[in-house]
Every structure is written in C-alpha cells, then in structure tokens.
Amino acid sequence: MQGVSASRQSALPKIGIRPTIDGRRDGVRESLEDFTLGLAGAVADLLSSRLRHSDGQPVECVIADSAIGGVAEAARTADKFASEGVGLSITVTPCWCYGSETMDMEPLMPKAVWGFNGTERPGAVYLAAVLAAHNQKGLPAFSIYGRDVQDAGDLAIPDDVQERLLQFARAGLSAARMRGRSYLSVGGVSMGIAGSIVDQSFFESYLGMRVETVDMAELTRRIEAGIYDQEEFSRAMAWTRANCKEGREYNPPARQRSRAQKDQDWETVVKMAMITRDLMVGNPRLAEQGYGEEALGRNAIAGGFQGQRHWTDHLPNGDFMEAILNSSFDWNGIREAYVFATENDCLNGVSMLFGHLSTGTAQIFADVRTYWSPEAVKRVTGHKLTAPAENGFIHLINSGAAALDATGKQARDGKPAMKPYWEITPAEVDKCLKATTWYPAITEYFRGGGFSSGFLTPGGMPMTMSRVNLVKGLGPVLQLAEGWTVDLPDEVSGQLDERTNPTWPTHWFVPRLTGSEPFDDTYSVMANWGANHAALSYGHVGADLITLASILRIPVCMHNVPQEQVFRPSAWSSFGAMDPQGADFRACANFGPLYGRY
C-alpha cells in the first residue's frame, strides 16, 4: 500500500485563461483575434511549464474556446470552466474590450487581469475599466500590467509580468486547493492552547473547508481491532528498525520505561502514523479487509492530534506519527508530505498548509520558545555572537511535528535545503534519517512513553516563519517573518539546547531586520508574535503568503517583505494607497470572508 496523497483524493484545480477582445466585427475583432489567442496560449504555456501542484503533478490550464467579446462568450466560457474544474481565472487582452460584458463574474474564483502594455490598441484602458467594474461589483481582481511598452504582435511575456502571473497563480491555486477539503481534528483542546480550540466557522467562511472531528479513542479502536494494513505494518516496522536509531536515555532510572515497553511503544507509534494517515485520506486496502467505511477517509488536506494529556498520560506520544507524516518520505518511499499539527493547533496547521501549498515542501511546526540576546548568550556560554546572529536569535523547538526534511541534508546548489518531494533523492532521504535520533520521550511530560525526534537544523537556510491568529471582533490575521537559520559553535549550541530539551529538534532563527518596528530588532519580532507556535517554510515565500491571504480576505498584521513584492487585488489601493497595511485591514473587512459571513 503506497498510501493516497492528500492531493490526489480530490481533483486538482486548473487555471482558466480568458482571452478578451474588442467585439466589433468587420475588421476590428478580426485584426486582433490571432494576437489575443496567442497571448492566452503564451500565458498557459508559462504557467504549465513553471508550476506544479504539491503532489508533483503539472498544473493544467484551460483556455476559452474563443476570444470573449461579449456576455454570450463570457457565459460559455464560465460553463466550460465549471465543467473542467477551473479554480482561478486569468483574463488576458492586448486591446480595448467591453469591461462589465466580458469580466469573470464567478464570485468565489480568484481573478487576475493582464492588460498588454502597447500603444496600437489600449489594453491598459480595458484593464482599468474592467478593474473598476470588478471593484464596483465587489469582485476583487489582481491587476497585471508590464512596466515597458511592447510592440503589437509581441508574444513574449516580460519578466515583471511573468513574476506577477506566477505569484497570482501560486496563491490562487493554494486557495482553490483548500476549497471543499477538510481539517481532521483528532481529539480536542490540548493543554488549554487556544489554537486547538477549533473554530469551524473560520474554516468554512475563510478557507472553504469543513472540520471533521474524530475522538482519539478511534486510534485505540483501530489498533486493538487491527484496522490497518497488516502487510504495510510489517514493512513499516522493518524500515523503522533499520532507519530510526534510538538515542540515549535522558530519564532518571526510576522514570525509564523497560526495554519491553519501548519495543511495544515502537509498534504503537508506527500504527498511529498509519491509522492517522488512513483517517485523513483513506486507504483502499481497508475495504479489502471488510472495512469499507474506514477505507474512505475524511477528505482531509490537513489535520492535528491533541495528544496531551488525555492520550499521552497513558499511551505513547504522537511525536513519531507527526514527524513522519510531515516528512517527504516514509517506509513507502519518497512522497508528498502531509500537513499535521501537534497538539491539534489547527491555526498552526493552517499556517503549515499555506506554506506547503505555496512551495510543495514539507513544513516545520515549532514552539517560539526563547529569545537569546547577545548579552544572555555571552553570560551563559562566554561566546560573543557575530553576524548573522549579532542581534540575537530565536530558539524554535518542539517535541512533535518538525519534518525530518528540516535536518538540512537535502541540497540545492550545494547548500542545505528542503525540496519538493519530486526533487529529493534516495541518498538525501538516507542522510536525513541518519541525522535524526529518536530519543525515549521524557516521561515527566509524556507518562505513556513514545519517542521524540532530535536533530539540529543547519544555518544558512532561508526560512519564512508564519502564523494565523484569531482575534475576537477582528477575525483571523496572518503574521510572518522572513529570515534564516543560523549556525552556532557546537559547544555553544549544545549548552543552550541542554537548557531546554535536547531530545527535540532545534532551529536557531534570525529574522531579516528592516529598521522599522517590529522588525527593528530580533527581540521585538518575538515580542510581537501572536501565539506560542509558528510554522516554518523553506524559502522566502512571504510575498506568496500575503497574496494568498488577500484572496482569502485575511489581513496581514506583521511582515518584513519588501513592498515591491507585495501583490494584492487592485481594490486595496482604494482603501488607502498611502497606507498599505491599514488598507489591507479595511479591504478585508469591507469585502468579508471569501466564502461567506464569519
């Protein structure tokens, strides 16, 4: 059983390309038809060649059957898009067209319009006119307009236009991928953590998702009744014994579990991983065993596990399950990473989901644990911090759901990286596994035992730290910080790690400082963080997350992305072009959640 990926259980959304044209016949339309359709084809070729879904499949584009010169052709195109699974649309034109007659009126579909910058025909005039119609009708659309004038008939897409087309497409696909899927909440609220108070209205109104709730007792039932693939379990245990090396025992003798208990714990945590995956996306092998209902899964694109304390006080913790699910590989080979939140922190799970859909890479779940100032590091270790950590750093660490990809043993251009699964080699998987130690769980935390992964993420990896928070009266907000992991001397890293928990994965992180609050210093970044958890995504992808948030009408309360990279619908400037952050809040409040009232 190779498992069913979180993507493949549902059809993947396509990008609809809408070539619009001046509908006047007897010379005008005829002179523009070939060029207009050529631009549409060029956009489709660009997107299909440069983009993949997170499961590795190429993105498909659907082009309208004809250029759209009026409402009849717009309606036929809408019907075609609906029948072919289009999830977002891009309107393309080199000329004047009739704005409200040719626009995309589908209310839930992310929209962009590229108006060709030329002089022979006024593509920019149509762009402005149709965007005015979008704004007036409450259907925000993204404006794409090249900086430099092009000659009529030029099918080359300028670099700046390509950048905007790809940025919109990545964000639009992410929004479309979530629509109609589920968040699987296994258990309830963990230790009073607000993020694990799952707000179903938030998922429904802002993400177009539903929440499926399963009691943790369902894992116990399936373990005891053998409702899992027995052949896969045998293979998974052999793989685990061969690849998951057990680390030293940090528990005092009186609190250590026996060898027999640990051996049983290994079997339990492997079963937990298999069963939770089956709960998320189903498993046809279960139907062969007579469990047709269980074989269906919950159509989940993300999930979380409460664990503490109603499970972990008497059963092995979820750390192995969470880490393996979030990684890009397991006993079935290299595969798309799942998105699964420790402590059922669904808001961190959503942040991880945003990052995964935007990049195709595995995600890191971490506590925002400690700010280490240069003075504190000097006092504790005697070491003076130097660049890039000269302003101090944030210790990100958590017992659970850090993907093993974060060991940094994958490489791109000779540097440590976290790559989409289709770029990962078996040799890199082997290195990731060898860099990970599985320590017996600290039983003062986890009375039921289990195993926690331990590794150190190397420095120099670009990262984007993000978090969705809910605020009463305001709704959801997104905050993010682009930065890098940093290296410390081994003895310094060891000293600092030992003060927290050396059996958990550690990531030393520094945000990119801008000189403006809250990015004037590293301390202020942590002081303004809105929760105890954060998601880390490989790469500087803050611009894509901001674009996605604007599609979903989630304002961004904190970011350090250069302003020229920020891309939101054109309507946002009407809410205060000289105050873009305030305009974001006002626009999101005005248009409201994409899928209905919160």
Image: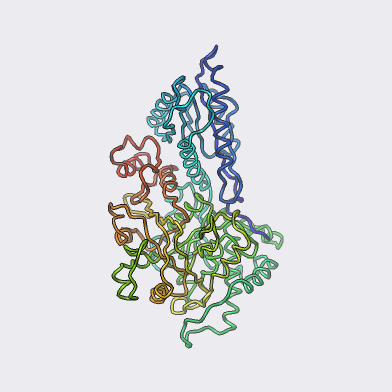
The structure residue drawn at horizontal position 53% and vertical position 46%, both measured from the top left corner, is 177
Percent x, y of residue 151: 49, 24
Q: Quadrant of residue 221?
A: bottom right
Whether residue 412 is situated above or below residue 598 in the rendered picture = below
Whether residue 140 is situated above or below residue 418 in the rendered picture = above
The structure residue drawn at horizontal position 46% and vertical position 32%, both measured from the top left corner, is 113
Residue 524 lies left or right of residue 38; in this view the side is left
Percent x, y of residue 580: 32, 42
Number of numbered discs visible in the structure rendering = 0
Res 205 seen here: no
Whether residue 596 is situated above or below residue 399 in the rendered picture = above
Residue 342 lies left or right of residue 496; in this view the side is right
Res 160 seen here: yes
In the picture as drawn, the residue positioned furthest to the top comes out as: 26
In the picture as drawn, the residue positioned furthest to the bottom comes out as: 254
Query: Could you tell me which quadrant the N terminus lies in?
Result: bottom right
Whether residue 337 is situated above or below residue 61 in the rendered picture = below
Which of these two is toward me, 3 or 118? 118
Q: Quadrant of residue 489?
A: bottom left
Percent x, y of residue 395: 39, 66
- According to the image, what is the colour scheme of the structure? rainbow
Which of these two is toward me, 465 or 70? 465
Percent x, y of residue 597: 40, 44
The structure residue drawn at horizontal position 53% and vertical position 40%, both measured from the top left corner, is 87
In the picture as drawn, the residue positioned furthest to the right comes out as: 288
